[in-house]
Image (tube, grey):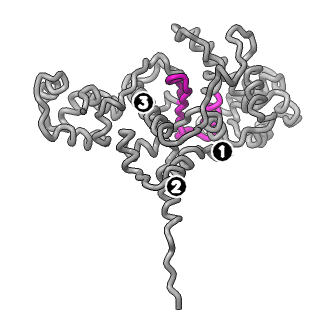
Amino acid sequence: MYQLDRIKAAQNLRGFSHSKTAEALDIPLATFKKYLSGERTLPHDFWTKASQLFNVPLSYFDVKNSTNFNMSEVNFRARARIKASYSNAIVEYISLAESISLYFARNIKNLPVFNILDDYNLDPDSDDSPEITALRVRSEWGLGVQPINNIISLLEIKGIKVFSLPLNVREVDALSISLDGQPFVLLDTFKSAERTRFDAAHELAHIFLHIYDTQNPNDDIDYKKRESEADRFASCFLMPDESFLSLAPKEMSITNMLKYKSYWRVSLQAINYKSHKLNLLTDWVYRSNCMKINSLGYHKNEPYPTHHDHSILYLKLLKLLDAKGGFSVNSMLNEIGISREDFNNLTFNSLDSFTEYKDSQKPKLRIVQ
């Protein structure tokens, strides 16, 4: 049974107003509003046309795909600067990400599960700094003090649901939310690889540092405090202080920092900030470096960029389902209630990779002479 409130969800997903939707469906605006309110009976082809307009399967309009949560539960930076249309779309993408996660949980046993209360000895009254917590997590995960090779796959292995955010929006770097006790992280992979790695560590910080928060931050001071704590955690998680100091060049010039950042796979700005924090740079040199980094455009275009970290989970899950036999991508998409494009975008282009994998498995005919 299709639900009228899913039309609003589809509008939010695609950034459609009532007037834009009515015009696209060739329906008078007043009539369209009466359809939504239930005052008028829908024409027989309404749902088919809506499905085509919003590029979603008909199953998207089924009530089972509806997820309820408050936008205030989402952790992301610069909440006040984000346009309402983007916020609405974010809610719908999170809902789709949860639907994908639930589908895999129904069809594949023994998936990694993140249980922070049972698996991690966290004290809600602890005064541990974000840096100490970051080092504890590294120790718990057996990471030592070396650079993290692939932070996205690391989070996946630990049971955190990681998705790629299909929005190239400057205001949104990444976001995280807990749904039924399970942490979800959505990353904007349109940013630089260094930025994405830091964003992933930043969202991991929210999971570990703010898991016990029962109240949402209610003013700018609370938000800034949370964001500062998450940044400090992320910096130490990616670059443990002791190891950073022991391996740092004797002279932290811009040239040497460019080389050093390649080792940790972080941004030049992150190296400059960390060096100053650990007293490898004076205040004057740090500020001079900041101005030089900005003047060279390195704050927008990362010099000597590293490769992007990638997901390994979703392709593996698709292969597992395929190996069982009787698996159909279209049936999966229909059950989830999601378009191929949205699924692909949310799961780091896993369907493209799966198609390549299937093509490689096809027998190749050879002409024998």
Q: Left or right? Give the position of 182 relative to 29.
A: right
Using the image, determine if residue 198 lies above or below residue 207: below
Using the image, determine if residue 167 lies above or below residue 280: below
First in sequence, mark 3 or 1: give its number.
Answer: 3
Which is nearer the eye, 165 or 321? Answer: 321
| Residue 94 picture location, percent across and down | 45, 30
Residue at 78% over, 34% down: 142
Which of the 4 image quarters holds residue 8?
A: top left
Which mark identifies residue 346?
none
The residue type indicated by label 3 comes to: Ser
First in sequence, mark 2 or 3: give its number.
Answer: 3
In the structure shown, which secondary structural element does the residue marked by tag 1 occupy? loop
Which mark identifies residue 305?
1
Nearer to us of marks 1 and 2 is 2
Residue at 52% over, 88% down: 368
**Label 1–label 2 contact, CB within 8 A:** no
The residue type indicated by label 2 comes to: Ala
Q: Which residues are magenta?
A: 173-202
Which mark identifies residue 323?
2
Label 3 packing within 10 angstroms: few (<14), some (14-19), many (20+):
some
Q: Left or right? Give the position of 312 relative to 290.
A: left
Residue at 50% over, 72% down: 363
Q: Which residue is mark 3?
A: 95
First in sequence, mark 1 or 2: give its number.
Answer: 1
Q: Is residue 144 magenta?
A: no
Q: Left or right? Give the position of 63 relative to 214.
A: left
| Residue 247 picture location, percent across and down | 86, 36
